[in-house]
């Protein structure tokens, strides 16, 4: 099966699951299509076993999940998400967002890695500490695709929605950088002081370089948008910004996700006000909203289809049941401690930490990073735990965050 045929199958399945969900189930579209894909995949595995896996492997290989997301879909989804975020809301919470997107990710990485390493050892499963930290790095960042796709309909208070959204837009880029650094260290079986210093420098280059690149290409696109007044051309300029800017970030070894977020915020705020006519704003918003929803649906169907090729081992289920509460605990501590300190200098709603903990959804980025771990028993274990945490996050946390928000707002 060629790439076009594989894409045709994926689009057809996505359309079918989206229709069934909209017609009868009425869950949020990302959740509905992922659930449909998961149930279909589980049914096929139960009925067909090895035969179905042998058929599915070439199909999903043509749609390489990690490459498709990290080198394709992610640029569009992050730009589209940032395009509709109010920059003033983020700037009012800049210190909290900066802390959550950096310090909290690093803290959570260490907590998850340490807790998982110890807990798995207690039940007879071995995961070297370096690989445990890798799992912590890939599961700690909240996924902006999952967050933005679900929180819009969840009824979360606006100030808190801005905080969760801002955190998710930036911490995935930081998380990807941390993951790459730790992956290099894990494959090297340890690190000297020099390599740790180089890792820190790499982190600064990727994260800081991505922000500067996003600002530069965003300003260039802004100047181009301001000089013309034709909606088709202006949509093409934003498309070039996303595709060309992300490719340039990869060439320069800077963070493409952070570049896309910064560029999207610039175009969606400053560009919207000063470089576009009302007609262009309408066309641009419609184009990117439709693009965002379609690519979101495709991504979540892919997540559901990954069941077809997941390694099966009852021990991985036990590991997942251990990982879910530990990841939530690490999230609570890594968010609660810095926000508790920030509360000393500026007021925060009493339910902020609880909702930030439960609203920290994981999604496709975590699965894509897990698939980048080199083949072996460590990869299989990490992939199984990651998929379990992601599914719990989207199906349980995503579907209940609205009720949790309403309950939390009523309680001190």
Image (spheres, rainbow, N blue to C red):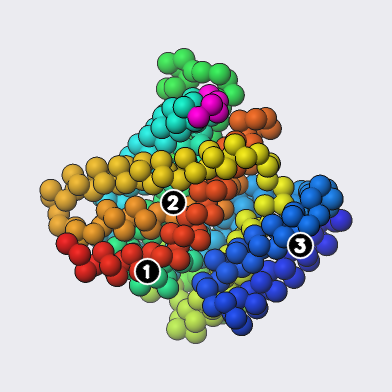
Instruction: Name the residue nearer the viewer: 61 or 120.
Output: 120
Mark toward the start of the polypeptide (3 vs 2): 3
Q: How many neighbours does mark 2 have within 10 angstroms: few (below 14), some (14-19), or many (20 or more)?
A: many
Residue under the image location 66 percent in, 72 percent down: 17
Residue under the image location 32 percent in, 46 percent down: 332
Residue hosting label 3:
7
Residue at disc 1, secondary structure: helix
**Which span is picked out in magenta?**
123-128
- Please identify the residue farthest to the left as the structure is shown: 344
Mark toward the start of the polypeptide (1 vs 2): 2
Q: Is residue 22 left or right of residue 278?
A: right
Q: Is residue 141 above or below residue 81?
A: above
For the C terminus, give its image quadrant. Answer: bottom left
Which one is closest to the eye, mark 1 or mark 2?
1
Where does the image place residue 260, in percent across and percent down from the top left?
50, 55
Q: CA distance from mark 1 to mark 2?
A: 17 Å
Residue hosting label 2:
142
Discs 3, 2 touching: Cβ within 8 Å: no
């Amino acid at each position: 099966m060629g790439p076009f045929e594989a894409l045709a199958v994926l689009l057809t399945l996505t359309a079918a699951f989206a229709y069934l969900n909209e017609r009868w189930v009425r869950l949020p579209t990302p959740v509905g299509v992922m659930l449909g894909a998961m149930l279909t995949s589980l049914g096929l595995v139960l009925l067909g076993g090895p035969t179905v896996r042998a058929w599915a492997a070439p199909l999903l290989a043509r749609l390489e999940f990690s490459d498709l997301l990290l080198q394709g879909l992610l640029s569009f989804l992050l730009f589209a998400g940032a395009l509709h975020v109010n920059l003033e809301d983020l700037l009012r919470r800049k210190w909290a967002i900066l802390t959550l997107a950096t310090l909290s990710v690093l803290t959570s990485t260490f907590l998850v890695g340490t807790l998982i390493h110890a807990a798995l050892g207690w039940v007879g499963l071995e995961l070297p500490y370096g690989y445990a930290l890798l799992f912590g790095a890939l599961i700690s960042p909240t996924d902006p695709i999952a967050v933005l796709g679900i929180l819009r309909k969840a009824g979360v208070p606006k100030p808190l929605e801005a905080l969760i959204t801002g955190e998710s837009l930036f911490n995935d880029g930081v998380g990807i950088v941390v993951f790459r650094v730790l992956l290099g260290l894990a494959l090297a079986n340890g690190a000297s002081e020099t390599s740790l210093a180089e890792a820190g420098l790499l982190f600064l280059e990727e994260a800081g370089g991505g922000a500067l690149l996003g600002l530069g290409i965003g300003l260039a696109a802004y100047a181009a948008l301001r000089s013309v007044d034709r909606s088709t051309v202006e949509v093409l300029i934003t498309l070039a910004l996303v595709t060309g800017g992300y490719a340039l970030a990869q060439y320069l070894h800077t963070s493409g996700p952070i570049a896309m977020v910064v560029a999207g915020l610039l175009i969606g705020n400053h560009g919207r006000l000063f470089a576009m006519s009302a007609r262009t704003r309408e066309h641009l918003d419609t184009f990117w909203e439709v693009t965002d929803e379609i690519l979101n649906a495709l991504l979540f169907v892919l997540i559901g289809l990954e069941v077809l090729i997941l390694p099966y081992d009852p021990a991985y289920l036990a590991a997942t049941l251990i990982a879910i509460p530990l990841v939530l605990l690490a999230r609570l501590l890594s968010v609660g401690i810095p926000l508790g300190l920030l509360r000393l200098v500026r007021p925060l709603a009493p339910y902020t930490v609880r909702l930030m903990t439960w609203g920290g959804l994981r999604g496709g980025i975590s699965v894509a990073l897990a698939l980048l771990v080199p083949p072996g028993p460590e990869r299989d274990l990490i992939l199984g735990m990651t998929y379990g945490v992601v599914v719990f996050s989207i199906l349980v946390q995503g579907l209940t965050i609205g009720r949790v928000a309403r309950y939390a707002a009523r309680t001190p």
